[in-house]
Amino acid sequence: MAGVNDFAVRRRRMVEDQIAARGIRDQRLLAAMKDIPRHLFMEQALWRRAYEDHPLPIGGGQTISQPFIVALMTDALGLTGREKVLEIGTGSGYQTAILAKLADWVFSVERLPELSRKAQLVLEELKIFNVNLVVGDGTKGWPGEAPYDAIMVTAGAPELPQPLVEQLTEGGRLVVPVGQRGVQNLLRLTRRDGRIIQEDLGGCRFVDLIGEHGW
């Protein structure tokens, strides 16, 4: 089993070779990804693969995203440390941890109770407390805490989930994969002067977003 120092070296190489080398420049984001131990968010049998450049299974038919995709989606939110962020799809909790390092507060919705419980335990172990986790239909967002400065959806939607668009504050950003099952385009929507501006950040592949406003 690799030691703590070995995992730190692997994280540094992951950030340098997979993320910074592919154009991510946000130093706070790069530092967060060097700091957060990705291997703790998966089963111990997968720890040796934790810093490779691809997604890995976490149970329930779900995955922990490829490190570069985590970085790309986080970078697209443009976080400064003052934001209230909504995450749809807690999953392993790894993306939640990265967001929590970069924002003021993170609200995260997961439809599978067991994943939410596991994520909570790891976040507590890492002393990450500026997060609120809930089990529910993430396609409806979290209306009671809206509006949000940034929203991230970590599963592929057939179309834009309208409740999430409505929960964006002025100047807020929504990053969401939209498209067919198995292949989507990563979109960034920004609310500006009452209008929604849409940008296409490229192709991606996510598990299905399940819920009333998803699949």
Image (cartoon, rainbow, N blue to C red):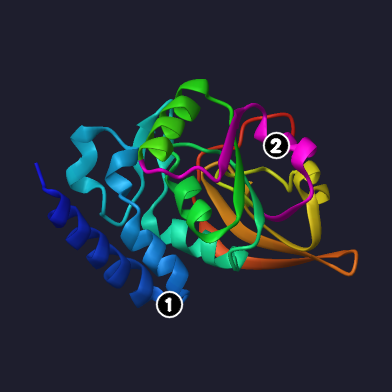
- 65 or 90, which lies in front? 90
**Most foreground residue, 113 or 211:** 113
Q: Secondary structure at mark 1?
A: loop
Residue 100 vs 120, above or below: the answer is below
Q: Is residue 140 rendered magenta in the image? A: yes
Q: Which mark is residue 23?
A: 1
Residue 214 appearing in the image:
no
Percent from the top left, x then y, of residue 213? 74, 35
- Residue name at image x 78 percent, y 45 percent: 146
Of residues 138 and 203, the one nearer the viewer is 138
| Residue 91 drawn at (x, y percent) | 47, 36
- Please give left or right for residue 7 compared with residue 182 in the image: left
Query: Residue 139, labelled with which disc?
Result: 2
Q: Earlier in the sequence, mark 1 or mark 2?
A: 1
Q: Which residues are magenta?
A: 126-150
Q: Amino acid at mark 1?
A: Gly
Rendered view: 21 above or below 18: below
Q: Circles 1 and 2: CB distance less than 8 Å? A: no
Q: Residues within 10 Å of mark 1 (few under 14, many from 20)?
A: few
Give me the residue at 45% from left, 77% from top: 25
Q: CA distance from mark 1 to mark 2?
A: 31 Å
* Quadrant for the N terminus in the image: top left
Where is residue 175? Give x, y as percent.
63, 57
